[in-house]
Amino acid sequence: MEPISTTYVAVLLLASLSVVTTLAGVALAIYIGKNERAIALGIGFSAGIMLLVSFLELMPEATGEAGLGRAVTAFTLGVLIVAVSHWVIPHTHLVEEHGAFAPGLVRTAYLVAFGLILHDIPEGFAMANSYIASPSLGVLVGLAIAIHNLPEEFAMAVPIVMVKKKRFLYAAAFLSGLAEPLGAMIGLVAVHFHPMLNPLFMAFAAGAMVFVSVHELLPMARRYHKIALFALGMAISVVIYALLALAIPE
Ligand SMILES: [Zn+2]
């Protein structure tokens, strides 16, 4: 394990990349607007990256360190907590169900932002806790998550662009982006006190990201009737991910 301060600095740098890509995604939403093909392609890519990180890196690492039983339990907990928070807090679905110009839209926009924040915190765990497992793994996961944020935030922000309040959008994006460094800090501090928590945080993050991919992103592509582009986006994510993994030395 690296000295604690190096770990903190490296993880915060990785997490701040995500703040940048989150803002870039919202800027794209403002300038491109509702391009359904771009959205479907982008969320396919985002979902693909999250599934690859979860099943190729986080789960094998967590299972190796904590055993299958504990890893699967933490994974399930990740699924459950995000699922419950999605049911308790109505968010993105509201925009589609009630139409873009429903009176409650601004409120909805806040809820969307909150939904994003909820899923960005486990992504912070993913990068921080995999960095603790091994710095090269942390760099791979951190870069992959930063890249996936761009199309994801683009897709999530498009429904809110109709509110026409750019300042609100950027503020929401910035807050949601900050959720990643916050999650990363929580992951680091928790492990500082209980090293055994590290694999469990990774498995928890995997559960949260798989849930978001399957419950949030796939249905969004279906609503736009662009499943083929979603699949193409996933295929592109596999190529980009492989290149990223090759470029980062073990
Ligand atoms: Zn995500």
Image: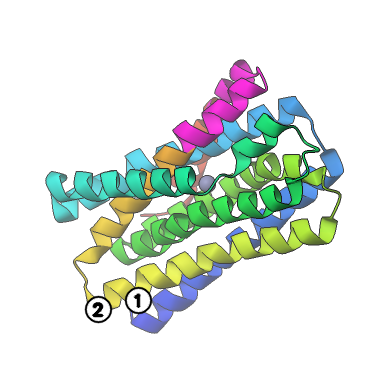
User: In the image, residue 72 lies at what x, y percent?
Assistant: 21, 44
**Residue sitting at x 44%, y 53%:** 141
Which residue lies most toward the front here? 103
- Mark 2, other Cα within 10 Å: few <14 / some 14–19 / many ≥20: few
Q: Amino acid at mark 2?
A: Phe
Q: Read off the residue under disc 2.
A: 193
Question: Looking at the picture, does residue 78 appear above or below residue 17?
Answer: above
User: In the image, residue 87 lies at what x, y percent?
Assistant: 46, 42
Confirm or deny contact between disc 2 and disc 1 (CB under 8 A).
yes
The prevailing secondary structure element of the residues shown in magenta is helix
Q: Read off the residue under disc 1.
A: 189
- Secondary element type, mark 1: helix
111 is within the stretch colored magenta: no
Question: Looking at the picture, does residue 139 appear above or below residue 218?
Answer: below
Q: Which residues are magenta?
A: 213-234
Residue 126 at least partly seen: yes
- Mark 1, other Cα within 10 Å: few <14 / some 14–19 / many ≥20: some
Q: CA distance from mark 2 to mark 1?
A: 7 Å
Q: Is residue 224 left or right of residue 5?
A: right
**Residue sitting at x 53%, y 28%:** 218
Which quarter of the image is occupied by the C terminus? Answer: bottom left
User: In the image, residue 154 lies at what x, y percent?
Assistant: 70, 43
Q: Amino acid at mark 1?
A: Val
Which quarter of the image is occupied by the N terminus? Answer: bottom left
- Secondary element type, mark 2: helix
